[in-house]
Structure formats: C-alpha cells, structure tokens
Amino acid sequence: MEKKPQSANFPNWVKVCLLIVACLISAGIGGGVSKTWGASQYTISYSDFVSIMLTAISLLMTVLAIFLAVLGFIGWTSIEQRVHSKTEDYLAKLNDSIMEKAEEAIREKTNAIMYEGVGAVEEEQEEDDPKDGSEVR
C-alpha cells in the first residue's frame, strides 16, 4: 500500500476566516506605517484631484483596451483555425467525390475505347456464313 502525503485540507469556511484575518492584519500594519511615517495633514487642490482622477481613468481605459485587443486576437485566431479546418474537411470530401466521378468516367471511356469495333461472336459467325450457301472468300 502506497503512502499518500498528508496535506492540510481545511474546510472552506476556515479558509475564508483566515483570509479575513490576514486582510485585517495587513490593514492594521498599513495604517500604523502610514500614521508613523506618512504626512500628518493631507491637502489637495481640486485641480490636482481632477488630474489624478483623469489619469486613473485613462490608465484603466488603456488596460481595458489592451485586454480586449488580446482577447480579440485570441478569438480571431481561434475562428481562423476553425474556418481553416472546416475548409480542409470540405475540400477533402469534395476532392474524394470528384476523384470518384473522374475515375468512373475514365473507366467508362476506357471500356468504350477498348471494345470499340468489337462485336459479339455470334454476329461475326452469321456474317461469315451466307444464307445462300456459297463461301465467302
């Protein structure tokens, strides 16, 4: 019997509680650091606030545009590959049917050329034996 490694399988509610505790601890550390070493008073003018907000919006729009461009390229590549494979399948089936028709036409034409001018044996014997009994030389 093979030993399986022991892993900590916590229930989901325990994982959520640990995540919340970690967030609260990091918030406390961040708040303490900013109070100790941060500026004591924050003043910002309206024009600076608007400038910061417009910069943030333009940055978000740029990231969104890049994300959509990547998704569009991936989607286009996927569509192109599917169209290519469907086209190959269609042309392979079409090629098979065309080849079957061509082979059948070639067989018919070959048989027609091969047996051209050849009659049945009974017909030739009747032509050799005239009805009046005289010999044909």
Image (cartoon, rainbow, N blue to C red):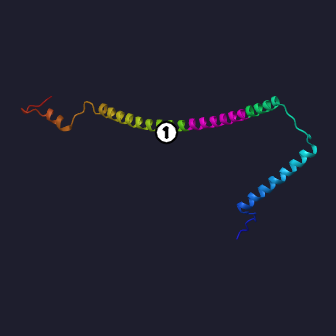
- Secondary structure beneath dot 1 equals helix
Looking at this view, name the residue that lies furthest to the left: 132
x and y, in percent, of residue 64 in the image: 69, 35
- Give amino acid for label 1: Asp
In front here: 90 or 21?
A: 21
Residue at coordinates 78% horizontally, 58% vertically from top-left? 18
Instruction: Count the marks.
Output: 1
Query: Residue at image x 72%, y 61%?
Result: 13
> Relative to residue 60, is residue 104 drawn left or right?
left
Q: Measured along the vertical axis of the image, is residue 6 above or below residue 70?
A: below
Query: At x 36% / y 33%, what residue is drawn?
Result: 106
x%, y% of residue 96?
A: 43, 38
> Looking at the image, which is closer to me, 94 or 78?
78
| Residue in front for this viewpoint, 133 or 47 | 47
Task: Identify the residue at image location x=83%, y=50%.
Answer: 27
Residue 105 at x, y percent in the picture? 35, 33
Judge whether 29 appears above or below 104 on screen.
below
Asked if residue 116 lies left or right of residue 132, the reply is right
- The residue at which mark 1 appears reads as 89
In the image, taking residue 114 as reference, residue 1 lies left or right, namely right
Q: Tell me the quarter of the picture where residue 84 sits.
A: top right
Quarter holding the C terminus is top left
Residue 7 figure quarter? bottom right
Tell me which segment is drawn in magenta.
Answer: 60-81
The residue lying toward the viewer, choosing from 77 and 42, is 42
Residues packed near mark 1 inside 10 Å, few (<14), some (14 to 19) or many (20 plus): few
Q: Is residue 82 above or below residue 19?
A: above
Q: Quadrant of the N terminus?
A: bottom right
Q: Quadrant of residue 2?
A: bottom right
> Which secondary structure class fits the magenta region best?
helix
Based on the picture, tell me whether residue 5 belongs to the magenta stretch. Answer: no
Q: Position of residue 87 (x, y in %)?
A: 50, 35
